[in-house]
Image (tube, grey):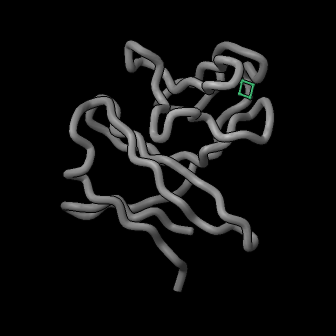
Amino acid sequence: MAESIKLLKKDFASDPSTSKFKFFEYGEEKTGFALFYKGSYYVYKNQCQHLPVELDWVDNNFLEDEGSFIICATHGAIYEPTSGLCVSGPCKGSSLKSMSFTMTKSEIVVTL
Ligand code: FES
């Protein structure tokens, strides 16, 4: 049975909002985040497509000021929330890695 991470929907206090989590991949600790945006959920690995760094300098701070885009704190790459596509910045045209998940009434269940 595949490992999973469960996030509570009630922890997404506003729309948009995010929830960061840790997971292991090939024995290495990584992070990901779930995004609640315009009534839907999205889950991405927390890795910029420009350099192998996390997107957030301030923990769980993934959105630019207006909350319309995901932003990388290092060099300001801008990603579309719904597709993960980088639309501006040094990695324009590449996409965040999405993670598969299912939902229950109260949880987001990320499959590892
Ligand atoms: S590391 Fe993210 S834009 Fe450069």
Which residue sits furthest bottom?
1
Task: State the image quarter where residue 85 is shown.
Answer: top right
Depth check: 81 or 77 in front?
A: 77
Residue drawn 72% across and 39% down? 53
Task: State the image quarter where residue 68 is shown.
Answer: top left
Residue drawn 46% across and 33% down? 61
Depth check: 58 or 6 in front?
A: 58
Question: Where is residue 60 drawn, in percent x and y?
Answer: 45, 40
Query: Ligand 1, what quadrant?
Result: top right
Question: Where is residue 55 drawn, in percent x and y?
Answer: 61, 35
Q: Is residue 9 above or below residue 59?
A: below
On the rendered structure, is 2 left or right of 53? left
Question: Where is residue 70 drawn, in percent x and y?
Answer: 51, 26
Question: Where is residue 42 drawn, in percent x and y?
Answer: 44, 43
Q: Is residue 10 above or below residue 104?
A: above
On the rendered structure, is 55 left or right of 82? right
Residue drawn 54% across and 79% down? 2
